[in-house]
Amino acid sequence: MLEGFRLGADVLSQWAVPAAIFVIVIAAWRKGIPAYESFLIGAKEGFGVAISIIPYLVAILFAIKLFLAGGLLNDTKALLANIGGTWVTEESIENLDLLPLALTKPLSGGASRGLLAEIYDDEKHGPDSRLGLTASLMMGSTETTFYVLAVYFGAVQIRRTRHTVPACLIADTVGLVTAVVVGFLLYS
Amino acid sequence: MGSENPAAPLLGIFLATTASTIAAIVAVRWLSGWSCYAKAPARLATDTHEAEKEQDDA
């Protein structure tokens, strides 16, 4: 059954992007919007975004590199392997490589994209490995919570956010855990 | 760095996003009942009027 599900997921995934482009073009045509020109404007704005995120990337990647170079992540992995013994597989310990990405995503979209690119570039993993695909799931199913709250609540001058932050963090955690579980089920 | 099938994570993203959305709805309902996240008392128009009057008197 899982094989059938994986096959269905593969077929659906392959057709999803062309279908989305087709729907966008048809919707633009029906509303009389020049799709190609609009696309070019968006592409031009992309360059501006790429340049504007560089300072955030430098700051957060520096902090993460410090965290990794200090050996804390490797020590945690070794500790878990020793505690778990045969119960903890190498694959599940490998998921700890996604921890910096999980911690960075709620803070900064740009910095987490940098970490994602590092996972894709890694010779050990790559974009089509289980870890690379799980990282993609994590990026796609979580939000840059603190950045979004600061911008949106700041724009309408709301200071008392009540239960928004804990609710967002609960949702992000569920998204991250589901991404890891789905990564195991679909891409192992 | 390029992927052979860039659309491969789509279904997984859909599943994980659905789970986190449901979690968000449940969390909001649950947390909104907590006293520490209670609504601030509504300010009435008369409160402002009375405050202005006090200021004028002073």
Image (spheres, coloured by chain):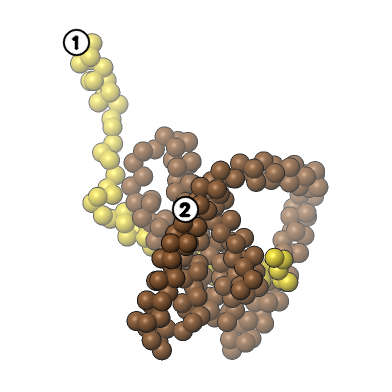
Report whether residue B11 is seen.
no
Query: Which quadrant of the structure image shows residue B31?
Result: bottom left
Q: Secondary structure at mark 2?
A: helix
Tell me if A140 is positioned left or right of A147 in this view.
Answer: right
Foreground residue among A170 and A55: A55
Residue B57's disc is 1
Residue A43, position as x, y percentages in the image: 73, 46
Q: Is residue B3 visible?
A: yes
Residue depicted at 34% across the width and 41% down the height: A160
Residue matched to label 2: A63
Q: Quadrant of the N terminus of chain A?
A: bottom right
Q: Quadrant of residue A170?
A: bottom left
Of all chains, the one bearing label 1 is B
Find residue A177 and report its horizontal and vertical position in percent: 45, 70
**Label 2: few (<14), some (14–19) or many (≥20) C-alpha neighbours in 10 Å:** few
Residue A110: % across, % down: 57, 50
Vertical position of residue A170 compared to residue A75: above or below: above
Tell me what residue is drawn at x 47 percent, y 62 percent. Answer: A68
In the image, taking residue A14 as reference, residue A5 lies left or right, namely left
Q: A174 or A64, which lies in front?
A: A64
The residue most toward the top is B57
Q: Which chain is yellow?
A: B
Whether residue A25 is situated above or below residue A89 in the rendered picture: above
Q: Amino acid at mark 1?
A: Asp
Quarter the C terminus of chain A occupies:
bottom right
In the rendered structure, the answer to whether residue A111 lies left or right of residue A168 reads right
Judging depth in this view, the residue of B46 and A185 nearest the camera is: A185
Residue drawn where x is 38% and y is 86% of the image: A85
Colour chain A appears in: brown
